[in-house]
Every structure is written in C-alpha cells, then in structure tokens.
Image (tube, rainbow, N blue to C red):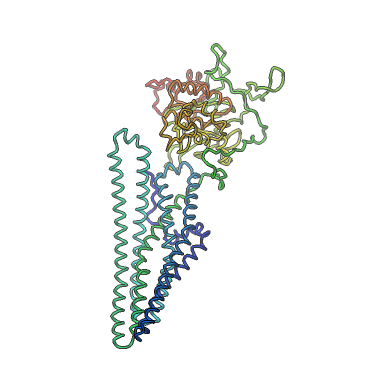
Amino acid sequence: MPDTHAATKDPSATRSLLRLWPYVRPVRTRLASAAFVAIVASCLGLVIPLVLKWIVDGPVADHDPGGVWLGALYLLLLGVAEAALFGFRRWLVARPLASVEADMRADLYRHVQRLPVSFHDRWASGQLLSRGTTDLMLLRMFLAFPLTFLVVNGVTILAGFAILLSQQWSLGLVLLVPVLPLVVLCSVFETRYSLVARRAQDQVGDLTTVVEESVLGIRIIKGFGQHRSQALAFRELSRRLRGTELAKARLLAGLWGLITTIPELAIGAALVLGTVQVADGELSAGTLVAFLSTALALRWPVESIGFLLAMSQESATATVRFFEAMDAEEEAGASTTHPSEDLPLGVPQEAPPLEPARGSAPSPVPERPASSADRAPGAPTPDPRSSIAGEAAFALPGTERPTQDELTLTDTDGGPDRLTTQPPPDHLGIRFEEVMFRYPDAAPGTSPVLSRIHLHIRAGETMALVGGTGSGKTTLTALVPRLHEVSGGRITLDGEDIALMPRERLRGLVSVAFEEPTLFSASVGDNVLMGGGSPDDLERALDIAQAQFVRRLPQGVDTQVGEQGLSLSGGQRQRLALARAVVGRPRFLILDDPLSALDVHTEALVEAALRRVLRDTTALVVAHRPSTVMLADRVALLSGGRITAVGTHQELLRGNAEYAWLMSGAEERHDGKGEDGR
C-alpha cells in the first residue's frame, strides 16, 4: 500500500485550522452571529446565581412567599430564554456549515480529477475516500460545535470569574489556583493526542482501502477461496484501529478526570472557607449561595475543555489530511475552469479543431492506403513505407524514404473529388522526437522506461506497436493524451507540441481505449457517449464495436451496467470501451490491445468494421496478435525501451528475428536474447 501517511509531527493545530478560512469566510457572518447568540445564552446562565442571591437575601430572609414565587418566575424565564437562544444558534449554523462541507468535498473531487496519474498510482483509494467523507464530517462538527464553544466557554469563564471576584475576591482567588496546572495539562494532552488522532485517521483510510478492494475483487476472493485470509487481514487492521482508539480514550479519560478533579477540589476549598466567613459574619448566606452557584455554573465550561480540545485536535488532523491531497500539484497546464464539469455523464465537451503548424497550410487527410489484409488476392504489393528507429538504425532491403510531394485532388472529370496516394507532409500525424520517460517516483540513477523514442505516424496512417511484456507499450501510448509527461524530447500532433496544448483540447482530439476496459455506474449510452459524439453517433459506434448485445438488454442503451460494469462479460465491456473510443470520430486514436477479450469470430467482425474507422483517423494500436497487426499500415517494434525497427508486417517478419519470434509464439528466440529483448 502506498505510504500516504503523514510525517511524525504535523503543523500546530491553530496553523492547520486557519487554512479553513477561505471556506469559512463566506459564512462568517452566520458563524459570528451564532457565537454571539451562544455567548448571550451562556451569560444568561450566570445571571441565575445573582437571582438566587436576591431570593436568599431578600424574600427568604424577609419571609416573603410572593417574592420567592417572583424569583422562581425569573429563573424560569431565564431558563427558557437560554434554551431558546441555544436552539436559535443551532439553526443559524446548520445550513451554512452543510454548504461549507459540500464545497470542500466538491473542491476535493475536482482537484483529484486534475491530479496526474502518478499521484493515483501512489495513493490508496481508501485514503482519498476517508479524506472526502470522515475527515470532512469531523471538520463540519468542529465548525458547528468546538469552534463556537471554545470562544463561548472562554468568554463565559472570564465573565464568571469577574462575577466571583466582585462577590468575594478571596474566594475567587482560591478558584484561580488550578488555572496554571490546567494550562500545562492541556498543552501536554494536545501534543500526545495529535499523534494518536493522526494515526487513527490514517488507519481508517487503510481499513477503507481493504473494504473497497474486497468488494471490487469479490470474484477473485471467492474464486480462490481467500475469504478467510481477507477476513484475517481486515481483522488485523480493525484490531490496530481499536488499539489506537483505546489509546485515544485513555488519554481523553485521563485529561477529563484531572480537569474534573482539580476544579472540584478548588470549589470544595472555597466552600469551606466561605462557610467559615458566613459563620464569622463576614459574608452573607445569599452571597455564598450565589458564589457557589456561579462556580458550579462554570464547571461545564471548564470540564468541556478536554472534550473540545480533543475534537479540535482531530479536526486539525483532518485539515492536514485534507490539504495533503489539495496541495498535490495538478497536471501541468491543467485549466482552473472546466465548463464541462457540471455536465451530466455522457454529455461531451466540444473540442476545438487542431490548428496547423505555423508556416503550413491546412492539409486534407489522404485516403488510407490498403493494408495487406485489405488487398485483393493477386494485387501487386505497394511500395513499402518502412522507417527505422532514428530512421537510420536498421534498414531493410529494397526500401526507400517516400517523397514529400504535395497532395493532389483528382477525379475522372478533372474536378476535385478524391485524394491521390501521395504521402502527406512530414509534420502531419503523430511524431515522437527523442522522447524519454522515467516514472516520477523512480529512484535516482535508474534507467528510463523509454529512451530516445523517434517515431512518425503519418496522417491517416495506422501504426501497430508490438513488443514483449513489460517493454513499455502501454506507457508509450499513455504519453500521447498526456496521462504521463515526457521526461525528455517532445510529441507533436500535426506539428504542434502537445505540451503546449491545453489538456481539454488535446483530449478532445485524442481518443483512447485502454487494455482494461473501465465502465461506470451509469447507463450503456452514457458510458459510450463519454467519448464524445452525439446520440446519433451512438448506434454507429455500437455497430463498429459489434455491440449488438446492447439491444437485447432489458432497457437497451438505457440499461444500467452497475459498478465497474461487472454485470457484463469481459468481451462486452471491451466492446463498449471500443465504442466509447470511436463514437466521437476522433482525429487521433490510441488503442491498447482493444480486441484481447473477444472470440475469434467477433474479433473478425470488429476488425472489419474498425478498418473503416481507421481510414479516417491517425491511429496507434498496441498489438499482441497477428490479426490485430493486420489492421495497421506499418508496425513499430519496441524493445528495451527503444523503437528498434519500423516497417510493414511482412518486412519485419522477413527481416527481424525478434518480431518474427513475437508473432510466432515460439518457445525460444531466434537470436537467443532474453524475454526483455536486451
């Protein structure tokens, strides 16, 4: 599991909580009003002892029943007013704090969507889920209760001690004696509790990850009979979390016990001293009753310090955890405004057209030359269009570089109608120029995954990418839509550097079908239309992907596929992922072994339909089987992180032993090299 836990010591609680100010500022008026109302309500409670003093020294001493009843009425009104004000305070904060929590959760979700893939490779999903749920709930509770009552109780204690000192300063000084020990005690508690609270919240994230993985992988767990081992793993994490929570409880119980005991001792001492003063005639009975009532009224504000500090510390830890994710750097060039974010699933965002490179006129895409699988039997073999890594490292007999003649439009009548077979200009299509890639978290000094990749996929051409397992094919394709950033060199689309293009525009031009198809908890139609296009394009895309099974589903394209699309078979999910890739008629298409889960007959049907799509786009297709390779005009061989050969399928079969070995499935390499081709 990635280490997403914090360092040993987090920033101070105050500094951490101050980072919430941008979210709190819009509702500061409501929070300040709620705090003021709570202060008034709490201070009303301090008036009650003064009424008691008046009752004891007045009506009781004078044997006046009417005065006693009047005093009782005053006490009742004060109690009702205090309760009403506290209820009003709760109403004031309920709606705005719910909005604060919702805004923070929305910001976290938006930010996570803009983070690079490398971030998600390092972070466990459960850690992000716990930050977006448990941690934000703690922050809402802090803003609703501890934040207000730390202020309210502080003001109440100050006002209460002012009343105590005004009534009898000597007894008031007795109650001030515990202040210093309580301050030291709270400081020690805060330091220790913060470490335990952080550990507990991290362990909640770990537990969430295990639960999520167990639910998503339930078929694997059941298939291999591993439910007991998963239960043991869950039980071990639960045991650790239980131990941490008990450590928190012990700390809080110790603090609460001391905070309760020390003031009680002071009140007891004041009671004894006050009784002596009443006996000596130095103090009236009413004043002593009022003094003790005021002191008892201050018990809750003092005793709640431990509870409020614990909640505040947990909230500070939650704030740190929240901003750990929010402080992660977004993808380079990520836009701060996303007009499509509020659109429902399946509503595409229009991508602006790709402008031609500077100094060049827009060029039409030529008609895609027929591949070897498309040619009629006995047709002559067209001139090969092979180019080799670095375009000089390897040469095949009888091949030569194509000329760069301009494209010409001709028809039988002499008017513009169709494109000739002249090759497009060199700057069009997809170019990899000295591209190097190393994962961001790779150890210093490690060899790059990809090194000095030089490859040109011409406009309207389909290039198959072939290589052994672990050679970097998927990594290379992920560089085109900038799921990863290149470590060196550059990639261009029709001559324009993708690093200089806004990501929204780039990803509107490039469509991807990954090796492992991922579907969302939405309808079939919504899942497919995530690739762009209109509802009219949906049927076309389903036909291309041979996904006619959709029409047999209970609600057709409106059928909900469930989480991860696991209600469908692997082949059905892959066909829907392929339909999603082609529905928007992309200008550039990246396919990562898109037919691996299909049976032979369905694969043949999909390939036949896919050839028509590939004629109108520039495509890079990761291929492991000869049938997929036959979709391409040319093939690039990736070995040891480099492009070692480029040519047609037949050329590489004849002239490259490694390629022939990969396509044949033989047990031994002809050149005697290892599996990685080095």
Q: Residue furthest front?
A: 66
Q: Position of residue 6 (x, y in %)?
A: 39, 52
Query: Measured along the vertical axis of the image, is residue 189 above or below residue 264?
Result: above
Whether residue 279 is visible, yes or no, is: yes
> How far from the left and from the top, in percent, is residue 259?
32, 68
Name the residue nearer the viewer: 44 or 656: 44
Residue at the far top: name it: 378
In the image, residue 606 above or below residue 17: above
The quadrant of the picture occupied by the C terminus is top left
Q: Residue furthest right?
A: 414
Count the numbered circles shown: 0
Give 416 or 2, whichever is nearer the viewer.
416
Residue 293 occupies which quadrant of the picture?
bottom left
Quarter occupied by residue 254: bottom left
**Taking the image as drawn, is residue 477 in sight?**
no
Near-viewer residue (650 or 46): 46
Image quadrant in which you'd find residue 272: bottom left
- Name above or below for residue 347 compared with residue 32: above
**Residue at the (43%, 35%) spot, across then down:** 565
Who's the residue at 48% across and 37% down the image?
437
Q: Residue 498, image x and y in percent? A: 57, 38
Q: Quadrant of the N terminus?
A: top left
Image spot of residue 201 (x, y percent): 37, 52
**Residue 322 located left or right of residue 430:** left
